[in-house]
Image: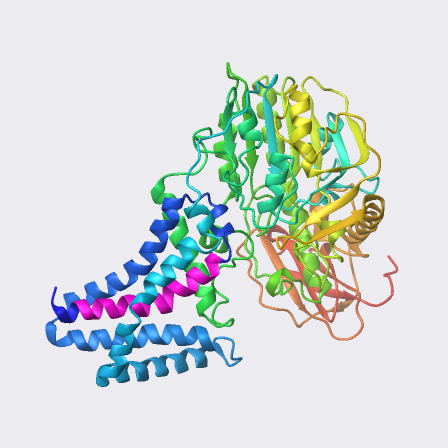
Amino acid sequence: MSPRLRVAGLHLVVLCSFAVAQPVFDLLGRNGEFFGARGSTRWEVVLFALSLVLVPPAALLAVEAAVRRRARGAVHAVFVAGLVGLLLLQGIRAAGAPGWALAVAAGALGAGAAALYVRAPAARLIVTALTPAPVLFLGLFLLHSDASRLTLSGTPSAYAAEARPRAPVVMVVFDELPVNSLLDARGGVDPVRFPHFAALQRGSNWFANESVVSEGTLQGVPALLTGLYPHAGELPVYHDHPRNLFTLLGSDAELHVFETGTHLCPRKLCHTSGGSLGSRLGSLYADASVVYLHELLPDDLARGIPSVSDDWQDFWQNGSGRADPARRFGRFLPTVRPARRPVLWYLHFLLPHSPWRFLPSGRRYEIRPSPGWSAAEVWNGNQAAVDQYWQRHLLQLGFADRLLGRLVARLRATGLYDRSLLVVTADEGLSFRAGEKRRPASAANLQDIAYVPLFVKLPHQRQGRVVRAATQSVDVLPTIAAALRVRVPWRIDGQNLLAPARGERFVVVAKDQGKRFVVLSAKLERLRDEALRRQLTLFGSGRPLSTLFAVGPDRGLLGHPFEGGRPVTDLDPIDRSGALVQVSGRVAGPARSVVVVARGRVVAVDPVVGGRFWALVPSRELRAFQVKVLGARPPSS
């Protein structure tokens, strides 16, 4: 390599480090969960960091080396202009101007910097003087950030207690499932909308006031599996939680573990965890590219980039709709079969977690989202828009119920159901309140976030039992151990729920930052009951999921003939290509609800809030249709 190319390569390393590597290191270095949630090993983190520093400049230098000698200077200047422009765009992206104008400005400034670089030796000398910067960025990331807790921790040998379970164990953890979503007007699981959850309630111990001890998956699932309250700074990995359900049973039981977002089962015990090195690194690079684009682009230019607020991985798949939790369930289900050894089956999968794109049948749909979800996981102020997401959550919960039914059917068909311990719960709740947070816990949404379902079917249990005492997610592990007659050889914060309750308890929900909400359980239960009444007012209960296409006080009109009303003409464009269609628009004058009428009957009902409405309609119902307004008074019918 010629001396000129060596200098050019050195300068590209410096500029790429400032424009690309350092912004990614800075963000991910403060969010070690990005690596912990996907189970990255220390060598994967090191390889990721080295490649981020070296691969982009190496690729650019390869292009320079491939062109004719006379053109290399011009090509190098273009690369310098582009990298400086990327760096400057990140500095001015929050200036408030349109994104295209900021991009043009950054490009112009980058071109000016490249011209100065070419003409002024002092400018090139400054870049040369910055040569130590890439090493500094790399060192700080690997040795002095959240990521360093993985790179410096090593890979310990798998801990396994001496415990032999007395029965097969099946544990299913749903995601983003508030218990209220399952309930009907009598306070039990709705047998019409969610027949499989209701059947499980009838034949198991239902802990009706089960609350989580953390607002999210990355702390909530470890609490379920360890019996310990979460602490600030912990990552959802085996290194931080070596004593858990998997290591408790792993010495004598065969483990089939399908984790999502956590990696508490060491690979020496759980062969179904992780994946190939290539697939893990590919996922890491792909998701880091999404993180970088959000750091780089102004908000209006980043609208087409997948969100990074739903989860910690698979951003491109989630954003494009290719992610399919049912496919993961399909890989899990065949592992459920009789075996000579004791077996633990564990499944945590993203249902009914957002994005909401499944009908109860499992059919996928795509619609233009209503503008209810703003930045920082805070709903906007239009409750009607928020209610549509709530509506879609309940429809997707119907699909989760369907998959639960398939699992129970598999257990019965293999002869495992009666003799197994079956535990079904969720890692967190969810809130649908305009102007409030969707999922991070707050004083306004705690009653929605805290309470989740917990069903424990003991071996050979046939009669159901409802337990109204306050319980917590840290109680799940000691309850499993007690049901299996296994001693937990470490200190735990939870208690065995099969034993008599120990008096009044508080609901404790920890935030990621370490703050805790501590509320007397009786007080929060009253607030949760109010939240259930609010849900029933909107969506009703005891009727099929198809009735969810009617929302609000006029939902009783669904399916009935309808004449009269004021036609709505200000409709948004309608995409009829999917299984579900969104009919939305604006209403002038006083209005309480709109009805969508096809073939003379009402096929959807939606409240009007702030002059706007968003109605969901099955596509098969939407032939020739009309949208009509109900006035401020209830209809005479």
Main SS of the magenta part reads helix
18 falls in the magenta region: yes
Position above or below: 110 against 269 = below
Give left or right: position of 338 versus 184: left
26 falls in the magenta region: yes
Give left or right: position of 345 versus 440: left
**191 or 214, nearer to the observer:** 214
**584 or 309, nearer to the observer:** 309
Q: Is residue 559 visible?
A: no
Spot occupied by residue 131 in the image (x, y as percentages of width and height): 28, 68
Position above or below: 607 against 281 = below
Give the residue drawn at x 60%, y 47%. Answer: 353
Spot occupied by residue 444 in the image (x, y as percentages of width and height): 76, 58
**394 or 89, nearer to the observer:** 89
Quadrant location of the N terminus?
Answer: bottom left
The answer to which image quadrant residue 60 occupies is bottom left
Q: Report the label total.
A: 0
Question: What range is drawn magenta here?
Answer: 6-29
Spot occupied by residue 324 in the image (x, y as percentages of width and height): 50, 44
